Structure formats: C-alpha cells, structure tokens
Image (cartoon, grey):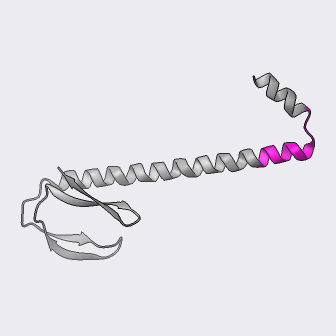
Amino acid sequence: MASARASEMEKMSVEQLKAVKEQTDLEVNLLQDSLNNIRTATTRLELASSALHDLSFRPKGKKMLVPLTASLYVPGTLDDADKVLVDVGTGYFIEVTS
C-alpha cells in the first residue's frame, strides 16, 4: 500500500506536493492541539480528584476558603464533604459524592 502511495506521489507536480504537505501539517497541528487539550483535561481531573480526597479528611463545620475564580476566594464552612460540586469547565459543574 505504501508503494502505491509513493507511486502516486511520484506523478504529482511540485505544487500538488506542497498542497499535500500543507494539508498534512494542518492535520498534525490539529492532532497536537487535541492531544494538548486532553493532557490539560487529564491534569485538571487529577487535581480535582486529589482535592476531593483531601477534602474527605476534613471535619464537618471546618472553616475554609472557597475558590470563586482562579484568584478570588471567599470564606466558607464545610457542610458535607461527601457531596461537592466539581467544575468541569466552560461553566459546567457536576455534583460528586465520595
């Protein structure tokens, strides 16, 4: 199969080969971006999992800082560590029970 593709490419003009290379470069960049997004999501999930694990050891009524944004925290009190909301991105939250 590879020899058939090589045979086809031998018949292409320089302009056609350039177009194939540009298309292949675009596809590789798209795949790289997708892989980076998956790695970022995996890291966020691992951090959330670790935070939930740590949270399960805190007693009910424990005072803590609750993140509203990446740089804004407000004081809060832990009510139920077995049921929390997890930010999964783009404004979506999931209620998770431990």
The x, y position of residue 15, in whole percent, is 90, 47
What predominant SS class does the magenta segment belong to? helix
| Relative height, residue 18 to residue 88 (above, below) | above
Report the number of numbered marks. 0
The x, y position of residue 22, in whole percent, is 77, 49
Q: Which residue shows up at 37% across the image and 54% down it?
A: 44
Q: Quadrant of residue 5?
A: top right
The answer to whether residue 43 is left or right of residue 57 is: right
The answer to whether residue 44 is left or right of residue 28 is: left
The x, y position of residue 56, in whole percent, is 14, 53
The answer to whether residue 11 is left or right of residue 3 is: right
| Relative height, residue 91 to residue 3 (above, below) | below
The x, y position of residue 16, in whole percent, is 87, 44
| Relative height, residue 32 to residue 79 (above, below) | above
Tell me, yes or no, whether the highlighted magenta stretch contains residue 13: yes
Give the extent of the magenta segment: 11-22
Q: Looking at the rendering, in which quadrant would you find the N terminus?
A: top right
Q: Which residue shows up at 90% across the image and 31% down it?
A: 10
Q: Which residue shows up at 41% across the image and 65% down it?
A: 90
Q: Which residue shows up at 47% across the image and 49% down it?
A: 38
Tell me, yes or no, whether the highlighted magenta stretch contains residue 86: no
Q: Quadrant of residue 83?
A: bottom left
